[in-house]
Amino acid sequence: MKIAVASEGDLVSQHFGHCANFNVYELENSKIISSRSVQNGDHENGCVPDFLKTFGVTLIITGGIGGGAVANLNRQGIDVIRGAKGGAQEAVEKYLSGKLISTGELCAEHEAHHGQGSDAHQCSHHGS
């Protein structure tokens, strides 16, 4: 299993669509066995789910996120835990121990600025 955390360096980002990077953690037997940070170079709607899918991510942990982004991630088979704060690795460890549960809240600000998750543009600016 691979979990990505929308991040600002090593901290959970509070704005999924504008995070600086994704910390991607590979798990085996519910333990972190490796991690890497990948730059989020393309903040357009629709790109991030495809980008994360190329790394085999099946779960994203983030702070704030809009409904369109959640729907796009879910269409790619990626579950979303929202409302996280603090360190990225700490958030993964809390999730693995059952202490991190999604708030279920959506950020209305994201919908106003980004629409409902259109993915009609070309995605080409993600770092690796």
Image (cartoon, grey):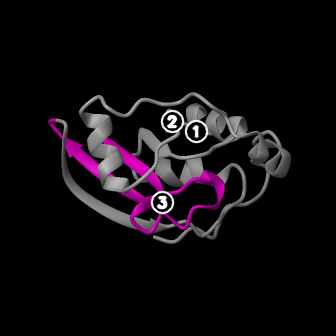
For disc 2, the marked residue is 80
**Label pair 1/3, CB-CB below 8 angstroms:** no
Residue drawn at x 67%, y 34% as measured from the top left:
106
For disc 3, the marked residue is 7
SS assignment at label 2: strand
Amino acid type, residue under disc 1 in the picture = Leu
Q: Residue 21's spot in the image, x, y percent?
A: 49, 65
Amino acid type, residue under disc 3 in the picture = Ser
C-alpha span from label 1 to label 3: 16 Å
SS assignment at label 3: strand
Q: Is residue 16 magenta?
A: yes
**Label pair 2/1, CB-CB below 8 angstroms:** yes
Residue numbers of the magenta segment? 1-29
C-alpha span from label 2 to label 3: 14 Å
Residue drawn at x 48%, y 60% as measured from the top left:
7
Q: Residue 95's spot in the image, x, y percent?
A: 32, 36
